């Protein structure tokens, strides 16, 4: 699977943004959708869980959708299957984040093009944890 063509410097700059909403964050600590955001929280990121099946994850209030979150979100990190990404991206761009990050293994050309047309950076098929560990 291909991935975006961002340089290490661009990814490094993206990782200086700290307010991150995580769509599809999991209650299950053995899943990447839980341990990746936990790692990020442990490394200075302000994580906002988005999962309609939970009220709290990692002790933080969980939102049913990104649109329910008050205030600015810098990065929207999506842990959903590639074929489901478009619906989440359509909602996410309304929050006008600086970046929409599709986790490793997630790639949806139509969704990525929509993000770019809105002037938002898109990262796809990359893991935030792996990129943070690699660059910091």
Image (tube, helix red, strand yellow):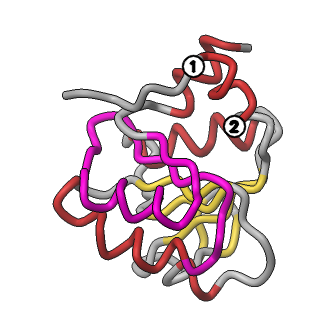
Residue 73 screen position, x and y as percent: 72, 65
Left or right placement of residue 74 versus residue 58 in this view: right
- Dividing the picture into quadrants, the one containing residue 106 is top left
Which of the two marks, 2 or 1, is nearer to us in this view? 1
Q: Is mark 1 on a helix, strand or loop?
A: loop
**Label 2 crowding class (10 Å Cα cut-off): few <14, some 14-19, many 20+?**
some
Using the rendered image of the protein, determine whether residue 27 is visible from the camera's viewpoint.
no
Residue 16 higher or lower than 86, as above or below: above
Residue 91 screen position, x and y as percent: 46, 80
Residue 26 higher or lower than 54, as above or below: above
**Label 1 crowding class (10 Å Cα cut-off): few <14, some 14-19, many 20+?**
few
Kindly identify which residue carries mark 2: 14
Image quadrant where one finds the N terminus: top left
Left or right placement of residue 128 versus residue 4 in this view: right
Residue 71 higher or lower than 41, as above or below: below
Range of the magenta residues?
94-123
Which label's residue is closer to the chain start, 2 or 1? 1
Residue 24 screen position, x and y as percent: 41, 62
Q: Kindly indicate whether the residue at mark 1 contacts the one at mark 2 (C-beta within 8 angstroms).
A: no
Kindly identify which residue carries mark 1: 7
């Amino acid at each position: 699977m291909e991935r975006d063509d961002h340089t290490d410097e661009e990814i490094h700059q993206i990782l200086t943004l700290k307010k991150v909403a995580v769509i599809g964050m999991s209650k299950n600590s053995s899943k990447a959708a839980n341990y990746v955001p936990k790692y990020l929280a442990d490394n200075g990121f302000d994580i906002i869980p988005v999962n309609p099946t939970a009220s709290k994850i990692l002790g933080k209030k969980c939102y049913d959708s990104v649109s329910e979150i008050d205030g600015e979100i810098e990065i929207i990190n999506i842990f959903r299957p590639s074929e489901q990404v478009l619906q989440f991206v359509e909602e996410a761009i309304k929050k006008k984040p600086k970046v929409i990050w599709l986790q490793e293994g997630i790639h949806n050309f139509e969704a990525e093009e929509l993000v770019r047309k809105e002037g938002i950076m898109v990262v796809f098929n990359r893991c935030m944890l792996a990129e943070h560990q690699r660059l910091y």
